[in-house]
Image (tube, rainbow, N blue to C red):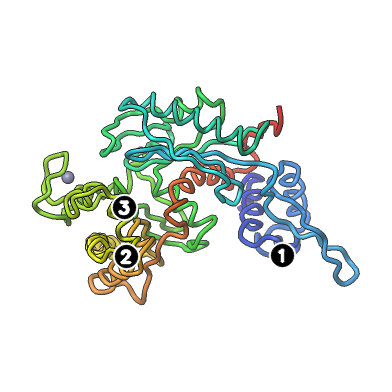
Amino acid sequence: MVASPTSSAAAVLRAVLRNGPVPRRTLSRLTGLSGAAVSRHCARLVELGLVVETPAIQRMGRPHAPLDIDTDTHRVAGVHVAHEFCTVVVLDLRCRVLAQRRVPHVSGDPVEVLENAADELTSLVLEVIPGQAPLSLGVATGGWVDQDAGVMVEHASLGWRDVPLRDVFARRLGLPVHVDNHTRALMHAEELFGAVGNRDSVLYLFVGNVVDAAVRMGGRTMRGRRSAAGDIAHLPVGDPAVRCPEGHFGCFEATVADQAWSRRVAGRSFWDLLAAAESGDVVARRQLAERSRIIGRVAALLYDLVNPDLLVVSELGANSFPECLAAVREEVGTRSRAPGNPVTASSFDSSTVLAVSAGAAALDMLYGNPLSASFAPTSH
Ligand SMILES: [Zn+2]
């Protein structure tokens, strides 16, 4: 099979991302492309401002200029839509957060909320990269997101349906917009910039005010029809006394979602519960670990269904407190056929994970198809 120029360029760019700074000769070995093809792709990627030659190392009398990702020329922007606020962010091409801002929802109207977030992003971009436009915008959120249509089909905790995310942001910002479910976007972030790397099969479990799973098999993240794969909200593994918005009892999301859990178990907001746990409150820590145990039961169930090489958990307990991650691991260890210890916390800490998911929705497209990226002028 002859690889297309697009997929060859993407292979070179990804090899630079994983191995940079890296000499051209090594890139040829890593990608299986000829030296001439690697040189041609590198020249184009340098021209586009995606790859940069690092200072040459004089070795064996010949100059070698290893290549690395250019983290100075271009930026991408992101918007993550959560239950109570949007996160707007500017990132470099290694998905590092340069600046982010939390924007509380201004009303219950989706378009008003999104347009306000777009305006806040515009002001953040002006502050961080004055005179420069980001390459593209990634938009990530929980629940059912139709990636092709660019639409939030359903977000249970917000109560939003059929919100045209891509159209609203494209109209307001004039940028190419890439939309995805935040758990799938985080899977891509882990693959490109985090712990997943080249692993063939991975299960990603996200718990916030919504819960989602993402499954990667054969090196591809499953999307399902209209990108609906990964909905685990109504798995009947929660508290049988809790009724979900659709009228069932014992659903996973209704039981463990951040605010639902803290209101019911601790009688306070999730942020108060988290702050108490962070200040060493033993009861608060136990209440979070109890939730992690339920999450671990679901992780065990899904583990046996998928049987992945790695299971990544993203929830504020497991990302912050060792006993929460230990509770997830213990449940997976005792209830599933998982060998050893395949459970890891997200590579991205809780202060950046939402911002990273938004950035990854844009960067996954860039690293998948670098030659078709829209290259806005860097100054105007
Ligand atoms: Zn339900």
Q: Is residue 168 left or right of residue 49?
A: left
- Residue that carries the numbered disc 3 in the rendered image: 207
Q: Residues within 10 Å of mark 2 (few under 14, many from 20)?
A: few
Residue 70: image x %, image y %? 69, 49
Q: Nearer the viewer, mark 3 or mark 1?
A: 3
Residue 143: image x %, image y %? 32, 42
- Residue that carries the numbered disc 1 in the rendered image: 26
Q: What residue do we see at 53% from left, 46% from top? A: 364
Three-letter code, disc 3? Val
Rounded to the nearest angstrom, the CA distance separating label 3 from label 1 is 40 Å
Q: Residues within 10 Å of mark 3 (few under 14, many from 20)?
A: many
Say above or below: 211 vs 293.
Answer: above
Residue 81 placement: quadrant: top left
Which numbered circle lies on residue 280? Answer: 2
Residue 330 placement: quadrant: bottom left
Q: On the rendering, which quadrant does ligand 1 occupy?
A: top left
Q: What residue do we see at 55% from left, 48% from top? A: 97
Most foreground residue, 268 or 47 = 268
Most foreground residue, 128 or 64 = 128
What SS does tag 1 mark?
helix
